[in-house]
Image (spheres, rainbow, N blue to C red):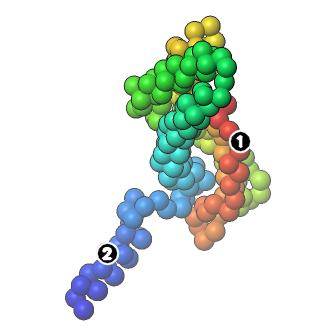
Amino acid sequence: MKTNAILLFAAVLAATLPGCGGPSAGTTPEETAESYAELRLGQLEEEEKRDLLEKGRMRMDQQEQAIELWADRGQIRAGLDVGTAGLEFIEDNWSDIGDINYDIIKILDVEKTIRRVTIKFHMRYPERKQKRPKEWYLVHRSKEETLTVSLIEDVWRITGINRGGDWR
């Protein structure tokens, strides 16, 4: 019984104190957008980094399997060399690639109690040099997401999200 009372007290305290128990809706559209963006950063970092390695390894496996089908194996081996260099570059620059950050770039008044907040996420992404395919470098990519937030009971809550397209 005493344990249940302590758990209930902790839950109430976490729900009422700002910054405790996870993100909360803000008293301004910007505060709510910042809470969302902080959550989204973790998701994006995990998704993007995982996808880079998984897709790269999958392409390498497919090329290795297909090598026996081709008469000109030199071209396939050259592609494997480029892919190997890319995977090594990704692994060597892992911490820089996954370093995603954000800016709130626009808050648009739609109605008295509705705002659209645009968040721009930035990351560094591996790209290979055209003239030297085995050499790679990091380029800047960005992606925008727009939140629709509404004033409900004195706090701004998310009522819609447009996640936009791919990284550009």
Count of numbered circles on the image? 2
Q: Residue at x 54, y 61 (%)?
A: 25
The secondary element bearing badge 1 is classed as: loop
The quadrant in which the N terminus is found is: bottom left
Q: At which x and y percent is residue 134? A: 53, 14
Circle 2: residue type: Ala
Circle 1: residue type: Gly
Q: At which x and y percent is residue 21? A: 39, 65
Residue at the far left in the pictured view? 2
- Residue 20: quarter of image: bottom left
Q: Which residue is mark 1?
A: 165
Asked whether disc 2 touches disc 1, contact meaning CB atoms under 8 Å apart, the reply is no
Q: At which x and y percent is residue 139? A: 57, 22
Left or right, residue 124 beside residue 19: right
Residue 45 visible to an observer of this rendering = yes
Left or right, residue 101 beside residue 4: right
Within 10 Å of disc 2 (Cα), the crowding (few <14, some 14-19, many 20+) is few
Q: Which residue is mark 2?
A: 10
Residue at the far bottom in the pictured view? 1
